[in-house]
Image: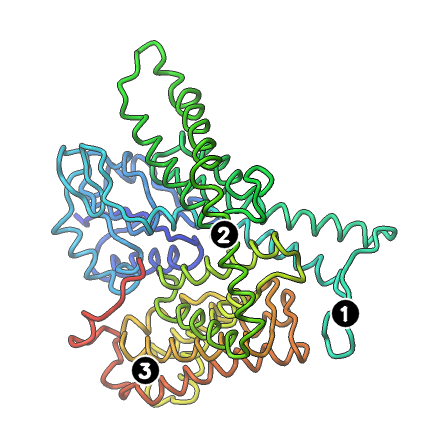
Amino acid sequence: MTKKIVAVTACAAGIAHTYMAAESIEKAAKKLGYEAKVETNGAIGAENVLTPEDIEQADLVLIAADITISPIRFTGKPLYVTKSIPAIENAEALIETAFKEAEVFGKKGTKVGKIQIGNDKEKVNFFTHIMSGISYMIPMVIAAGLILAIANVYAFQKDDMGHIVDWGFNTKTAMGYLMSKLFYVGQIGFKLMIPLFAGFVAKSIADKPAIAPAMIGAYLVNDPEFLGTEAGGGFLGAIAVAFIVGYMVKGLKKIKWPKLVRPIVPIMIIPFVATLVISLIVLYLIGIPIANAMDAMYSGLTDLNNNFAGAPLLIGAVCGAMIGFDLGGPVNKTALIFGTAIFTDTMAQYGINGANFVPQTAVQAAISVAPLGVWLATILFKKKFSKEEKVAASAAFGMGIVGVTEGAIPFVAAQPVRMIIANVVGSAVAGGLAAATGCKFYGGIGSPLGTFVGYIEQPVPFITWILCVGAGILTTAVLIGVLRRDAVEFASMAPTEDESNLTEDPA
């Protein structure tokens, strides 16, 4: 009888890794002669959901996720937990390992991947919780950012060279009134983004009772009026609040509450106690120091950009290089968070004209370089790629053109050292040039297409952005062509023995 596998895949953003891992598992299972059903937990929610019958009939449960996935429904089944990247890079090996090392979930004291069963100690790290929060935050960032960008396009008054000379809405006209309200909607989205992020980071640590206290605490730590400061605590304050609340609630849940009050503990007592305590902590302990530190950092970055001509180039190159390093992994996401945080926090503090665009512009310029670079390399250096790789490059192009950097992952898995070098250098070139030329990314798609889809202020309208990003793409493509060996040696796109142990794990 054919063995059956059920799997769940998920990544922080819920966009690329989730579905790439699912497809890889399905193909590998079919090749190995197994039946597989994969549930994806992407940005749109759970799809192809596993039924109780699917789980009951399964010989193996495989969770390949970068965020916390509850394993309770898999009690009594052999379970193996890993990250999404191993599934994308080599799903066949992962499945074979899973069958050998999977342990029955629910057996007290046993370990399953990153989960310690029986004593409620989840072996997850700091970044796992951060990624869980990001996965819920990203849809709000995108929605609010695009709405804000649409309103900005109408509000900015530009000269013949595309430079902004005035900004504002004429609310006496119907269109001006509508755009002013859309701008307000976008601002609200960015204002709620940080509390939402904190709420779901805390949920990753201590589940639902932690959401409300963390959201309220994160709002307060970013409210200058509440703190009596010039600025809020930004993302750093939200992260501090989320972890304090998460572990506070986790501790409160372990208390042996009297049987009489147990029904109201998760919905009344814990949220009340945690909210009260975190409010006092923010007000008297962490709020003001963090807010002052963030204000100093933002002011320092702004002064650096204004007083040193080479600062935007250097900062942009570093941020761009981080984007190209691990393609959606922790370094990549750190750069994205940093860019978003700097932009949103400085815009809230100094207004649209005083916002610091450098990090966000750099990361968005770099985000499509790796996938589009490998696609271009297959065109410029045809003899160095197999037919299978050229097909994969077409898929990489489709992802890269809409600003999804993960499209280059299969090529990095095949030759990690060479590809990482090419991606990092090309991404640094794009990020550095975009920042140095004064481009300002307000919202849209982080690819050459972004100059038409969204709003990017640039010295030469439409052209500067394309040239900056194109330079990075060309750099990556040329480096791939120079560093890559002949296609006949790498036709299978499998990691070589000398490089496989050097592959970076973005999870």
Q: Residue at x 43, y 63 (%)?
A: 335
- Residue 165 is tagged as 1
Q: Along the horizontal axis of the image, is 77 left or right of 68?
A: left
Residue 500 position in % (x across, y down): 20, 71
Helix, strand or loop under label 1: strand
Type of amino acid at the residue the image marks with label 3: Ser
- Front-lying residue, 280 or 139: 280
Query: Which badge, 2 or 3, comes first in the chain's sequence?
Result: 2
Name the residue carrying label 2.
Answer: 138
Q: Which of marks 2 and 3 is in front?
A: 2
Query: Which badge, 1 or 3, comes first in the chain's sequence?
Result: 1
Q: Relative to residue 440, is residue 377 depicted above or below?
A: below
Residue 262 position in % (x across, y down): 34, 16
**Could you classify mark 1 by the number of other residues whose Cα lies within 10 Å: few (under 14), some (14-19), or many (20 or more)?**
few
Query: Which badge, 1 or 2, comes first in the chain's sequence?
Result: 2
Name the residue carrying label 3.
Answer: 386
Whether pointer 2 and pointer 3 mark residues with C-beta atoms closer than 8 Å, the reply is no
Helix, strand or loop under label 2: helix
Type of amino acid at the residue the image marks with label 2: Ile
**Could you classify mark 2 by the number of other residues whose Cα lies within 10 Å: few (under 14), some (14-19), or many (20 or more)?**
some
Helix, strand or loop under label 3: loop
